[in-house]
Image (spheres, rainbow, N blue to C red):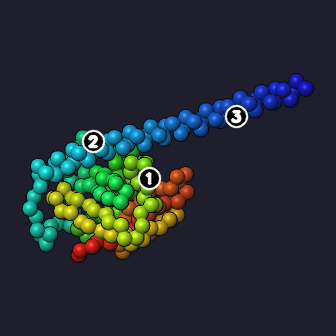
Amino acid sequence: MKMSKKRGTIFIIMGTLLMLSALSLFLYNRYEDARAGKESEKLLSDLQTALEEDQEDALSEDLPPELPVVEMEGYGYIGYLSIPSLELELPIMSEWDYDRLKIAPCRHFGSSRTDDLVIAAHNYKKHFGYLSQLESGATVFFMDMDGIKNEYEVTLVQTLVPTDVEAVQKSDHDLALYTCTYGGKARMAVFCDRLEK
């Protein structure tokens, strides 16, 4: 009888600890999501101000294939992404790593000038959390730091296995956006093609 009471007490304590751990993880993820959203909003404003101040009149045929990079707060940015149907505007970092992804979406590969740009972001609600809601035909814009606005149309929304990097890197689409699904077991990828070549 005493042994079963001890077991019961242990199970109650373990269950309580597991519930507290789950709650802590949930609250931490909500905090990270909110922090990333605020950081992106501030960076976007700074980036748009820098773009207005330094905008160049560049002819597209004279542009080098590499995108210009503007340094802000110790990080490089290549421009910003706008997805009107999701009411989303985000600064895009020039390089990616896991620490940068906590701040803003990042270029993973390519350039808008060579029609092979790949952008990765966390699935934070204020980043690419609603990417799966995009439908074929939706419009996506990318403004680079020379003030060149690139207009794309969503042509494919697809779920991929996490290891299929080549599917986004060599997709034959002009722009690819991707994020992990909740739980990280798959990747949500959106492929876009330029509206005007």
Q: Give the residue at the far top of this rendering.
A: 2
Decide if residue 164 is on the left or right side of residue 103.
Answer: right
Decide if residue 107 is on the left or right side of residue 17.
Answer: left
First in sequence, mark 1 or 2: give its number: 2
- Say which residue appears at 76% left-offset and 29% top-offset: 10
Q: Looking at this view, is 180 or 41 the one in front?
A: 41
User: Could you say which quadrant of the image residue 42 lies in?
Assistant: top left
Q: Looking at this view, is 40 or 84 the one in front?
A: 84
Q: Give the residue at the far right of this rendering.
A: 1
Q: Name the residue under label 3.
A: 15
Q: Mark 1 points at which residue?
A: 129
Q: Position of residue 184 (x, y in %)?
A: 53, 54
Q: What residue type is labelled 3?
A: Gly
Element under label 3?
Answer: helix
Cα separation, mark 1 vs mark 2, equals: 19 Å
User: Could you say which quadrant of the image residue 80 lies in?
Assistant: bottom left
Q: Position of residue 136 (x, y in %)?
A: 40, 70
Q: Which amino acid does label 2 sit on?
A: Lys
Element under label 2?
Answer: helix
Q: What residue type is labelled 1?
A: Gly
Cα separation, mark 3 vs mark 2, equals: 41 Å
Badges 1 and 2: C-beta atoms under 8 Å apart?
no
- Say which residue appears at 38% left-offset and 62% top-offset: 177
| Label 1 crowd (10 A; few <14 / some 14-19 / many >=20) | some
Q: Name the residue under label 2.
A: 42
Q: Position of residue 85 (x, y in %)?
A: 36, 60
Indicate whether 57 appears above or below 17.
below
